[in-house]
Amino acid sequence: MPASSFVRGGGLAALAAALPLVAPAVAGAATVSSPPSVSQPYCSTHELTPEQLAAGETSEITCYSTLSDSLRAVGVDAPKGAGVDSLVGTQVAASGIAAVHYKASGGTGEYLSVAGDGCDGGGISFSAGESWNDAIASTRHRLCSQVKHYSDNDYTGSIQTTNGGNGALVPMNSALSRQVSAIRYLGSMNP
């Protein structure tokens, strides 16, 4: 290999590719089947129960290229012909989705649908390195009228509580924007 390619990083890249990556297994760590990308902006996960959260489990997030595939993966059937705007707005009943979280403050771009059937303190928790950890900039209320966002994945640190009816979009404040590591779903259930 010519010296110039090593200087430009070619030799380092080849060396890095040849070295195996070994990481210790972490109990309860999330597995991400498909990391989000421009071609797979629709992510989904299931709400963990309060007991699962207390046990330190983290959320398993999978991303898809279409919204209907993402919702179907968590057991929610999208109404035939419904577009993204109607599915995340108030036009469709909130059942099946606790909330939707976005990486953009205006409720656009990549988003995470959280399937759930109650607002009893269950939630989600991101492991370090997960693409949604420290990425959320806004939340759209669906089933749950109250959503508590935490800066640390053990439900400590800075907190922002958002409140709203089905379809209400709330941006994270400056202390929590792109700093959310755990979320709990509470409050009364929206229609």
Image (tube, helix red, strand yellow):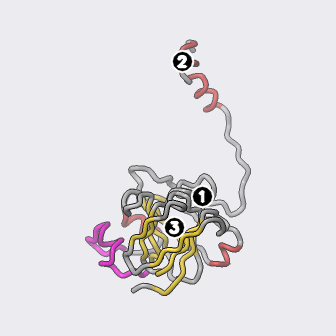
Describe the element under mark 3 as helix, strand or loop.
Answer: strand
Tag 1: amino acid: Thr
Horizontal and vertical percent position of residue 12:
61, 26
Q: Residue furthest left?
A: 81
Residue under the image location 46 percent in, 58 percent down: 63
Horizontal and vertical percent position of residue 153:
64, 64
The answer for how far apart the CA atoms under marks 2 and 1 are is 36 Å
Callout 3 crowding tier (Cα within 10 Å): few <14, some 14–19, many ≥20: many
The image quadrant of residue 102 is: bottom left
Quadrant in which the N terminus is drawn = top right
Q: Is any part of residue 167 visible from this angle? A: yes
The answer for how far apart the CA atoms under marks 3 and 2 are is 43 Å
Tag 2: amino acid: Ser
The image's mark for residue 167 is none
Task: Examine the rendered structure and indicate whether residue 104 appears above or below residue 124.
Answer: above
Q: Nearer the viewer, residue 138 or 8?
A: 138
Describe the element under mark 1 as helix, strand or loop.
Answer: loop
Is residue 80 shown left or right of residue 173? left
Q: Are marks 3 and 2 in contact (CB under 8 Å)?
A: no
Callout 1 crowding tier (Cα within 10 Å): few <14, some 14–19, many ≥20: some
The answer for how far apart the CA atoms under marks 3 and 1 are is 11 Å
The image quadrant of residue 40 is: bottom left
The residue wearing badge 1 is 31
| Residue 88 lies within the magenta run | yes
